[in-house]
Image (cartoon, helix red, strand yellow):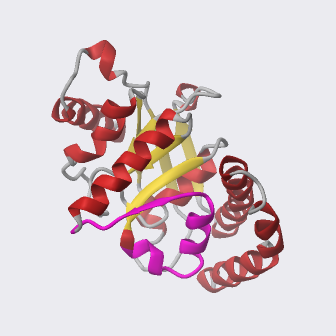
Amino acid sequence: MKTIIIALLTIIYTFFTWPLRIINRKKSREEREAANYKLLRVLIKMVISITGIKISIDGKENIKKDTNYLIIANHKSDLDSLILIWLFEEPLIFIGKEELKKTPFISTWFKEIGSLFIERDNIRQSAKVILEGVEILKGGKSIVIFPEGKRIMEDRLGEFKNGSFKLAIKSKVAVLPVAIVDSYKAFEESKRIKSANIKINVGEKIDYKELGYTKTSELCEHTKLVVERLYRN
């Protein structure tokens, strides 16, 4: 029943906010995406309230206002992106797989907030997206990427892909490590949204320049160790 209610809410909210999103298109890209991000956060807060999902946060003080990051998080559920939007007040840009464009309503909203989509089998297109992401980071906005590249629905982390960390090295922006714990229990276990206790652990920023790293592999390995520790905390 909750899944049906949430689906109806999403459809109705998307329909009734359409005029606002049309108005937002007259704004600059940055203003448009920020305005649409606020609209999306309202929807997500309603969805989380209806589901009965309880989210506890540790390390929120590590999210500094007016500071942008490359946010690196583990990936357990289709809900992970929504949970991060619920957590971060300042607009986020997501880099996700091309297949997300085919998801009704979700794709609409993620396009509206400026998300980028990677074709994993297209090296040229993937490189172009990374370069676009670098420019976004240099422009002062935060980007979220899940370096595992897929959901890991086990009590462990998957392999982190080095390529994700080119964004930090090329933009000279610090990494903010985030561990999401038990989010798969809210959806993936039954493919129906249900109440669950989810924990988010936010670590201190990782400044690769201070650590003396020059290779993406070094930053990747270090970040995975940090996220692993946060996940087990």
Which one is in front, 48 or 21?
Answer: 21
In the rendered image, the quadrant that contains the C terminus is top left
Whether residue 17 sits left or right of residue 139 in the image: it is right
Any magenta on residue 50?
A: no
Which residues lie in the magenta part? 99-121
Q: Quadrant of residue 124?
A: bottom left
Q: Position of residue 117 (x, y in %)?
A: 41, 63
In this view of the protein, can residue 92 be seen by the observer?
Answer: yes
Which one is in front, 38 or 130?
Answer: 130
Picture residue at 66% right of the left edge, 54% below the top: 33
Q: Position of residue 7 (x, y in %)?
A: 64, 82
Any magenta on residue 107?
A: yes
Task: Tell me how many marks there are.
Answer: 0
In this view of the protein, can residue 152 be seen by the observer?
Answer: no
In the rendered image, the quadrant that contains the N terminus is bottom right
Q: Position of residue 20 (x, y in %)?
A: 82, 67
Picture residue at 56% right of the left edge, 64% below the top: 110
Picture residue at 48% right of the left edge, 37% below the top: 137
Q: Position of residue 94 (x, y in %)?
A: 48, 54
Picture residue at 59% right of the left edge, 61% below the top: 53
Which one is in front, 89 or 18?
Answer: 18
